[in-house]
Image: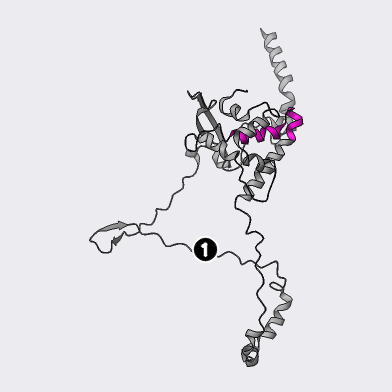
Amino acid sequence: MLRATIFIVLMLLAAFWPSLGENQGLSQLKGAAARAFSRRRRAVLFPPGSFVKFTCSFATGLLATYPKGISFVLEEAVYFPVPGVVDDIYPKRFLPKTTTKNPEKLPDTIVYIPGTDWRFKAQTLPKPKWRQPPPKTHRIDDDSYGNPYKWHQWNKEQKWNKWIELDQTKAKWSNWTTASPKWKNYSKAWQSHHYYGHRDRRALFDRFTKLSSLFGIDVKSCILRTICDSKRLLLPPGYSMLQDMLRVVFTLPRLDGLEDDYTRIMDRAADDCASELKSKCNMNLLIWLLSGRVE
């Protein structure tokens, strides 16, 4: 028993002897990896005003045979704010409490309706605070407006202006020396307000024609056929919002003096242009948009 006790004491001395001779006031710096992973708590800060959004969407098809493919969608979104500053990390009960200033209570104003005995109580608006006016802008198209080198010249010329008498002779013959009025520019008067809509929509359709090599079909002929079919396959205005939208897209305003393929199709009858373009484009794009089937 004594031998076992002595053996245990020797083992304890051998284990703790190096630490007994060291100075307890000094500490040893650990490695960078050990110090990085020894942090107890970490937090990620996002830009102020950030939030996490969870969206739940329900969709169902409407019981309608024509037009087909219209669905009813119900969507709900929930927002959760994320920490944007250091104070958002700590619980609010540990943060110092702030006191808000009570709003100033203004007296009520009694307003009478002219010509009657009716009156009502109106809330008095607070006096608006003074705001610093925005800085004045200087013209950049006129160099003499903001050129400081001409300030002295202006002051010198304007110094004696109020003492200079007007030339009576010049004022007498001013009506004979006035310049003749210029001719008005009527170049844009002939342009209809539909011209820009015709031009922009035509440019958009021309961009679609570049996809002919990708799809393997004549896209321009299909667009012209859709313009033609919109005259005879769509319901009258006011019966279907979707068909009214398609009518607006595929109805190009006509412009006198501008002749192109779109204007020619708009001027022709629906049956004539349909028989002409049916051989060039076998796909009825309008039927596909409304019913989802390809003829």
Residue 230 screen position, x and y as percent: 58, 35
Residue 184 screen position, x and y as percent: 65, 67
Residue kind at label 1, given as amino acid type? Arg
Residue sitting at x 66%, y 41%: 264
Residue 246 placement, left or right of 7: left
Residue 271 screen position, x and y as percent: 60, 32
Please name whichever residue, 196 or 105, is drawn nearer the observer in this view of the structure.
Answer: 196
- 207 part of magenta stretch: no
Image position of 240 with respect to 146: above or below = above
Query: Would you name the residue on which mark 1 appears?
Result: 131
- 216 part of magenta stretch: yes
**Secondary structure category for the residue under label 1:** loop
Residue sitting at x 62%, y 92%: 168
Residue 248 placement, left or right of 64: right
Q: Please, what is the dominant secondary structure of the magenta stretch?
A: helix
Image position of 85 with respect to 8: above or below = below
The span shown in magenta is: 210-231
Do we see residue 283 in this rendering? yes
Pick out the residue farthest to the left: 117
Image quarter hosting the C terminus: top right
Please name whichever residue, 176 or 130, is drawn nearer the observer in this view of the structure.
Answer: 176
Do we see residue 43 in this rendering? no
Please name whichever residue, 80 or 234, is drawn nearer the observer in this view of the structure.
Answer: 234
